[in-house]
Image: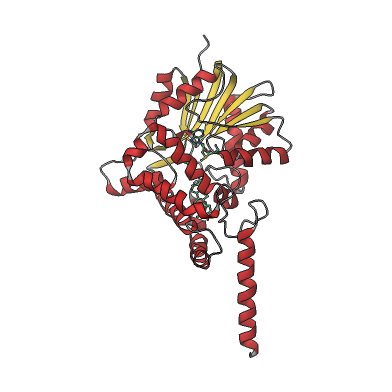
Amino acid sequence: MDTITFICTASLLVGGLYWVVGLVGSAEQKKRHAIDVSFGSINGDKVKDKHNQYSTFFHRPEEIAKPEKVADFVNVFYDLITDMYEHLWGQSFHFEPSVPGKSRLESARIHEEMVADLMGANPSQKILDVGCGVGGPMRAIASHSGSHVVGITINEYQVTRAKTYNRKAGLDKQCEVVCGNFLQMPFEDESFEGAYSIEATCHAPKLEDVYREIFRVLKPGSMYVSYEWVTTHLYNSEDREHVETIHGIEIGNALPGLRKWSDITEVAKKVGFEVVKEKDLSRPPAGVWWSRLQKTKFSNWKKRMMVMVLEKLGFVAKGTGEVQEMLLKTIHHLARGGETGIFTPMHMILCRKPEK
Ligand SMILES: C=C(CC[C@@H](C)[C@H]1CC[C@H]2C3=CC[C@H]4[C@H](C)[C@@H](O)CC[C@]4(C)[C@H]3CC[C@]12C)C(C)C
Ligand SMILES: C[S@@+](CC[C@H](N)C(=O)[O-])C[C@H]1O[C@@H](n2cnc3c(N)ncnc32)[C@H](O)[C@@H]1O
């Protein structure tokens, strides 16, 4: 072997080893630049089946229309993507306006603390996090306000992750996590002094059902804040590109159907809330929320190629590439939704449950 061949072979071996090591570590061990393809929530041999199960919902739209099926399909989605999200995005599964001079994680924290400030959360209160994910916002809000936070998520794996992170952050006394459906919450009437939902109620087949349930568990006089995914006044249902973009967002994010911005207050009032404030937090002068998606696009396509090869070689679970591709397509649609202004993931509504 001549020197050049030796150097090339050695580099390929070292490079290959680097990627493979990046693939097999646990979510916490892995570095952010490794290919994020573990599925802590499901066995490797089930990834393809689960992804097929997920896609089937969109091939049979009548399935998505059945409210009782939606929770299952959302749960399958989070089994598939929770680890991937955590690796590259962190413990908060939402967007935020980018704040000049701040990193994405710092901007996310500001966006989360704003929820606590809007609710006026304080250490004497018990607050509900509706659709809590792995608890990034819950920990930020508990530390910022001193309040006790109870989170609910439909996904059992997220409950395990959230509890682990709460313990590690020393917040397990202040933060609780429950597995359950936010359409039928296992909580007493009037048992919370505040509630919030961050980019979560968009998964509900009917917004009215989740808002009514939140209204039920709040004490009179309590505040509720929500960041909603909606189409804006610029969306035109006659425009093919608009329709494609919105449908693309729904497919890649387990959404049974995006709502119009004007539906949000209407539903809040219908279930009995007073609407105190409503604002699209993505509007200028707020920094754009989709810029980071565009930056990651190219490096993600490189990862896609790598995953394809590794899947063929049997190093990663079959179906991994399909899940990754679904998320990559979503990036495109989300960014398009942001650029055209027809979609926002941060339509904020602040409500109060009236005093009796
Ligand atoms: C609120 C929701 C999720 C919003 C965002 C947190 C996520 C939307 C799209 C996600 C991602 C797309 C591409 C992924 C990439 C292919 C993978 O290698 C690493 C993770 C991604 C970057 C991932 C990260 C989270 C998102 C930006 C919805 C579900 C209501
Ligand atoms: C995009 S994640 C946002 C998580 C968290 N709010 C955050 O910002 O990090 C949406 C969350 O809503 C939860 N969810 C969706 N449908 C649900 C349902 N029917 N009942 C309970 N949780 C649900 C998901 O399990 C997930 O945790």
In the rendered view, how is the structure colored?
secondary structure
Quick check: 353 left or right of 124? left
x, y (%) of residue 58? Answer: 36, 45
The image quarter containing residue 223 is top right
Q: Is residue 14 above or below residue 136?
A: below
Query: Going by the picture, which residue comes out furthest to the right?
Result: 170
Q: Residue at x 44, y 41 (%)?
A: 73
Q: Residue at x 68, y 54 (%)?
A: 29
x, y (%) of residue 6? Answer: 64, 85
x, y (%) of residue 297? Answer: 48, 58
Query: Going by the picture, which residue comes out furthest to the bottom?
Result: 2
Query: Going by the picture, which residue comes out furthest to the top?
Result: 356
Quick check: 261 left or right of 290? left
Q: Is residue 194 visible?
A: yes
> 40 or 355, which lies in front?
40
x, y (%) of residue 239? Answer: 27, 45
Q: Residue at x 70, y 33 (%)?
A: 172
Q: Residue at x 41, y 40 (%)?
A: 255
Quick check: 134 left or right of 166? left
